[in-house]
Image (cartoon, rainbow, N blue to C red):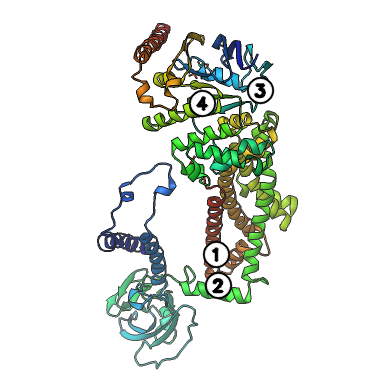
Amino acid sequence: MIGLMILLVYVAIFVISFLIVRFVVQRTNTDFTSLKTVTFGDESAVISNRFASVVSVLTIFLLWGSFTGSAWVPGFLHAPGPFVGETSFTYTVATQDGERDDATVHVRVVDFGEKPEKFDVPLGDGLAKDDALAMSASRSATVLFDKNDEVTRKEGTRVVAIDGVPIAPGGSIRTDAGRFALTSKGAISFSPPKGLQMEPIWLPPPEAVVGRVIEIANEGYRDSTLWKHLGYSLFRVIAGFFFGALIGIPLGYAMGLSDWFRGWFEPIVEFMRPVPPLALIPLVIIWFGIGEVGKIILLFLASLWIMAISARAGVSGVNISKVHAAYSLGASKLQIMRHVIMPNSLPEIFTGARVAMGVCWGTVVAAELVAASEGAGMMIMVASKFQLTDIVLMGIILIGVIGFGIDVLMRRAENWLVPWKGRS
Amino acid sequence: MSGLSIESISMRFDLPNGSSVQALKDVSLHLKPGELLSVLGPSGCGKTTLLNIAAGFLAPTGGQITMNGHVVKGPDAERGMVFQQGALFEWMNVRENVSFGPRMKGQTEAEWGNQVDHLLDVTGLGDFKDKAIFELSGGMQQRVALARCLANDPDVILMDEPLGALDALTREKMQGLVLKLWKETGKTIILITHSVEEALLLGERLLVMAPRPGRIHKEYRLPFAEMGVGGDLREVKKAEGYATTREEILEMIWDMEEEIMGRSEEMQ
Ligand SMILES: Nc1ncnc2c1ncn2[C@@H]1O[C@H](COP(=O)(O)OP(=O)(O)O)[C@@H](O)[C@H]1O
Ligand SMILES: [Mg+2]
């Protein structure tokens, strides 16, 4: 239900902001790139709309905030929250003899995170006495109405109506106060309106997550500061990738240049490549333990095959005319290796490096989920055990941001070092 | 004997399926220093194969190539090569490309600087020295390839359809440039082309090859290259004999193509 609502709101924002930007903001903007609706193979020709990106990100935060009742989203944009405060309802009992009486239940519903405290109310008169109920928002509570009544369920007394609406054991009704059900034993189960907002335990509001970032950045989590956790993960990725490239690139070159090397390593590389690094975690833990060595070896293995294959592709992809031209310009084999084959393979190697860094980052988080005493994955793993959803979310967001940052840096380096990529 | 000698070269390619292709059969030819030979022939008649053998990239299955008396055993700086496209080094700028040969020989910039800059000016690349290769048009890229070859000062320049990928107008200008460079430098040049006009305009000698097996079909000695040096190539096309020779060669190649088509129809 809520999911469908969110989807509808999301689609509505998508369509409305599109229409606004198209017909109000960017009406005058018609250049030739806008005519190029389909481009194949040329990344740079497809420009994404900046407005769309900004609105998209804002929409996510808006939806997040409004369905969690965030303080950062103005109140009128909040999805209806769960009922909090005082309410009451009246129940009607009927004894076996057919005598009837009404009594009121006073309910105090406290917000998420607060502790419901018992309170007393005057009993009132008649057979049934008034009751007091303290409960948490979005929960259900069972009222043992006959604890203080003169007639009890044991004697055959039954609740027959709530707020004047008839109800039978096992049945349920809905009134302005909320939803009521009678248990099979005849007790009243009361659920005040839940509203459309998520409970913090499922999805905390954005300010809770940001608060956690600040708190953990200042005070640390599990004996290490936030930066130390992230630093550990990054260090493992960089160390693993470094060794993977250090061995993988020369291996790929050797495979691209010599049929013996190619024949020797091809079965190994082709077999290892489709094995997901995650599948190696158990074996690596058995062999090397859960310490740094094991993790770095895992990431080394994750990047090794990718780097070897991309270096091999870079070498065998060299246009034979370039090599011939270099030969007839008087270059030696070593010079051709250094000045033609190696630079020519750089674009492929960079593509491989970007893939490898992505895979390594994913693998390190997974490895830390399994076993680690520091690291981004370990933070969310431990937090999830204690149902600290805000830390889990914080971890996921930071992992995403860092992964994105790595890719942006790799692309920058690529543009700087191999500007001819895809343009020759 | 000085110059480039192609001595009864044969080339057979053994295909993986067990059959074989006779790409060249008993091709002989002598080029004196400073001669410009254009080679024409239907596609698949072995022109590229012949050039690759002359360059030393391929070892022939029969015969040999000699260069100024010694037998060619592999690629060497004395025989420069200009390819159709894709042979420039994208990771170097224009000047680095052109100076590649001298730099590989270990020369310092003081040694090659003047010559390279001169060649860049001659080929009209003076203002593009520091540009990246992918920033240049196709015509400019071929000028870089020419300059790079000349900067290495080879005795023979082998060109495999060097202007094949250019548009008509650029192509005409480049033909003028090739003639000019040939006259100025006095290099021996073999130029393979698909275009009968280009072969006529540039070839002091013109070789028509026939396919299956690749062999020399007919050779011409032509006056048009001399006429074209420093002059207007379009005027040359109006010269006496140009049109008739052109028709004759076109007919010859047409017949060969017909024969190839006919044969492949029979095979089916
Ligand atoms: N490496 C090779 N392996 C097998 N056959 C080849 C090879 N190179 C060329 N050939 C064959 O030799 C013949 C001549 O090719 P080529 O010299 O490229 O012709 P051209 O340049 O005149 O078009 C063609 O039939 C071609 O299929
Ligand atoms: Mg060819």
User: Residues at marks 1 and 3, common chain?
Assistant: no
- The answer to whether dots 2 and 3 both sit on one chain is no
Q: Position of residue A12 (x, y in %)?
A: 30, 62
Q: SS class of the residue under badge 3? A: loop
The chain identifier of the residue carrying mark 1 reads A
Question: Quick check: do tags 2 and 4 share a chain?
Answer: no
Provide the residue designation for mark 4: B183
Q: Residue furthest top?
A: B266
Q: For the residue carrying disc 3, how many other residues have a C-alpha within 10 Å: few (<14), some (14-19), or many (20+)?
A: some
Mark 1 — residue? Answer: A398
Say if labels 4 and 3 share a chain.
yes
The label on residue B74 is 3
**Which amino acid, by three-letter code, is at mark 3?**
Gly
Which chain is disc 2 placed on? Answer: A
* Structural distance between the alpha carbons of marks 4 and 3: 28 Å
Viewer-nearest of labels 2 and 4?
4
Q: Quadrant of the C terminus of chain B?
A: top left
Q: Which chain is disc 4 placed on?
A: B
According to the image, label 2 marks what residue?
A213
Instruction: Check whether the beta carbons of the residues at disc 2 and disc 1 lie within 8 A of each other.
Output: yes
Give the x, y percent position of residue B33.
58, 19
